[in-house]
Amino acid sequence: MTATHCPYCALQCGITLEPNLQENSPEPVSLTGRDFETNGGALCRKGYSAAKLLDHPERLQAPLLRQADGSFAQISWEHALDLVAQKALNIRAESGADALAVFGSGSLTNEKAYQLGKFARLALGTSRIDYNGRFCMSSAAAGTNRAFGLDRGLPFPLADLDGAGMILMLGSNVADTMPPFVRHLAGARDNGGLIVVDPRRSATAKLCADNAGWHLQPTPATDLPLLLGLAHVLVTESLADTCYLAARTNGFDSLRSSLAGWWPERTAQVTGVPAEQIRHTARALAQAASEAKTGGKPVYILTGRGIEQHSNGTDTVTAAINLALLLGLPGTLAGGYGTITGQGNGQGGREHGQKCDQLPGYRKITDPEHRAHVARVWGVDPETIPGPGLPAVELLDALGTPTGPRMMMIHGANPVISAPDASRVIQALSRLDFLVVCDFFLSETAAQADLVLPVLQWAEEEGSMTNLEGRILRRRAALAAPENARNELWILSQLAQRLNAPGRFSPDAQEVFEELKLASAGGLADYSGVRWDDLDAGAAIYWPCPAGTEVRAERGIRNGTPRLFLDGFAHEDQHAVLVPVVFQPAPRKNNSSVSLVTGRLLEHYQSGAQTRRVPELAQAAPEPRLEIHPTTALAHQIAQGQKVVISNERGAVTARALLTVDARLDTVFLPFHYPTSGTANLLTEAKVDPHSRMPEFKHAHVSLSAVKEE
Ligand code: SF4
């Protein structure tokens, strides 16, 4: 029996795998839920069916090289690795190292994420690395760094939510995306204190029914003014915790004046949320926070991609944090602020150097001391490490341009589906001289590659992941890999040899982890005190866990730092920063357009490249459905189940109508998990947030037209 974790989302639910030795077993391993703090033994249907991917008939069996006629032919690993190295050397000699690019992922293990950053900078010598986490957690990271000086998704254990008296959850639909999370909302629901903010009456919003809480349903893309309106009530009705603000924060005076224009009636006009509901919510939060500090139940504010994946995502996160600070919650036992990481290793993936401006341990690539530390660990001169590169949208845009990359390696990502303005991405990839994709299926992006390298899946590899609480935990191999699939650590090690790279590129996960620890030592995300043996023994350790310091232990297992900021925030003066932010409404395109909100379904994970291949998930949600209010559908002459073309200046998508009163009258919803002709990201805009470079995923204007079917 192998104790490991689900391959999908950042909840990293505990699972147990056991080899299926009987003939005709449907999967090579049987999979059951295992008791872990995030899931308590429960799994969602994605998790339960994850073993179906392991011996899937579409699993890639050998390296595939594009032929002159456009087809793929199988080639040997020697040939494939020689080809990648030779192409990289030739292109670098002709156009310089920045003609090479790497695109990573928040699904890679910590070791692969770390090694990929090192490989890009030392073996290829390029600055041009970024990853799909730019599309996921970048606004949350930018906002929390600005306010607290440190970004860890949940700065407290998830189980702390269990006893909450009130939870304000903005832009997150955990009931669909990570159902075992819902058990942690039970305390707030029992207390009548679950408040959900979402333009849709999502599965999570429905949890507020029967006096379990209430649902605020703002106009899409108005989360920021709604938060400003809530903060206005706290300030003008003297409900803010002034003692806390004076002792633990900076910037209250400027924040207070910035909120003056957001009285409830004006906020209601902009957001569509009634003024009385805004007042009621702010007062209820203040009352609950005040009680929490005198022995009552804690209060939490949680955000998700719904408010973060916008071109003002950082400011919206900042406004949510400002609200939490006004209530006096972060860094106390009375509650706090947290952001719910999405991808399986979305937390670890953003710590170890896959970002274009970052070195391992959350170090800055522009800081001479940070560069010197990492250079020492890598055994190179700091000058060898390139400077900052380009964030994901800009990197993809630059592909194949006169000064842009000519070759790209993609690991664990499917940007043809998951990047904004998908047609533009497809064109950009087609401009490359050589595209290499490492994957275990022929994803939509792999289908565009010149060379596809088949890699291991989750149950075949060793390594570590870091979950949404910042807990480092073990991923373990439970079965042998297919004969011709390879670990990406091995691939990078082989390529580094062929490229004559400085430094060591071990193919062994534990060895890479030991090096990662050294590189992270003294950084904000410090793993240096984490022992592989402890992880092997079942520990899930919260960073920071510095070497040589006394580490707290629970149930005899060292577990790092479960709660951050209790003794001070990570800024030099240990104060949190209240940052005034401004709302600038986007111009409406034309009167006949409706708002499009994009998102996720219960059955599918990210681009769907994996879950669309699991028969029961594909059967349950085989194609994109356009959620539309019956009145809006009638106005557009759209019937239940009818095909609809959803279009704007960037593209057109066809989906079947699902009439539901859960949608607002002015808004339709489309999931993004589907192949090229149906992906919602054909319609989303690549306009980016100035701080995080997050694109505008969550809101676009679209026109609708019913398709007349014979
Ligand atoms: Fe748990 Fe997420 Fe896996 Fe579902 S997908 S079982 S919520 S880790």
Image: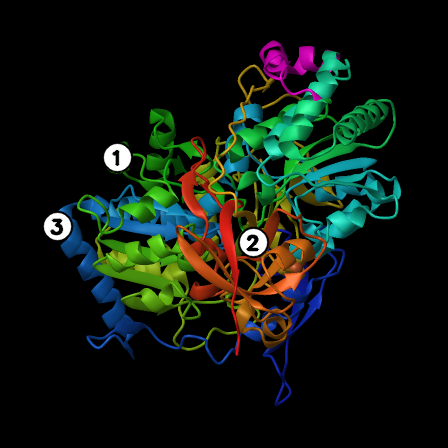
- In-image side of 81 versus 208 (left or right): left
Circle 1 residues within 10 Å: few <14, some 14–19, many ≥20: few
Q: Secondary structure at mark 3?
A: helix
Circle 3 residues within 10 Å: few <14, some 14–19, many ≥20: few
Residue labelled 2 has its Cβ within 8 Å of some atom of ligand 1 = yes
Which residue is denoted by mark 2 in the rendering? 344
Q: Quadrant of ligand 1?
A: bottom right
Q: Secondary structure at mark 2?
A: loop
Whole-percent x, y for residue 191 in the image: 88, 39
Which residue is denoted by mark 3 in the rendering? 93
Residue labelled 1 has its Cβ within 8 Å of some atom of ligand 1 = no
* Residue type for callout 2: Gly
- In-image side of 296 versus 517 (left or right): right
* Residue type for callout 1: Asp
Nearer the observer, disc 1 or disc 3? 3
Residue 376 visible from this viewpoint: yes
Q: Is residue 415 above or below residue 186?
A: below
Q: Disc 1 or 3, which lies upstream in sequence?
A: 3
Quarter of the view holding residue 620: bottom right
Q: Disc 1 or 2, which lies upstream in sequence?
A: 2
Q: Residue at x 63, y 75 (%)?
A: 616
Examine the residues drawn in magenta and state their main secondary structure. Answer: helix
Using the image, tell me which numbered label, if any, was put on residue 381: 1
Q: Mark 3 and mark 2 in contact? Answer it, CB < 8 Å.
A: no
Q: Which residues are magenta?
A: 243-263
* Residue type for callout 3: Ala
Whole-percent x, y for residue 565 in the image: 65, 26
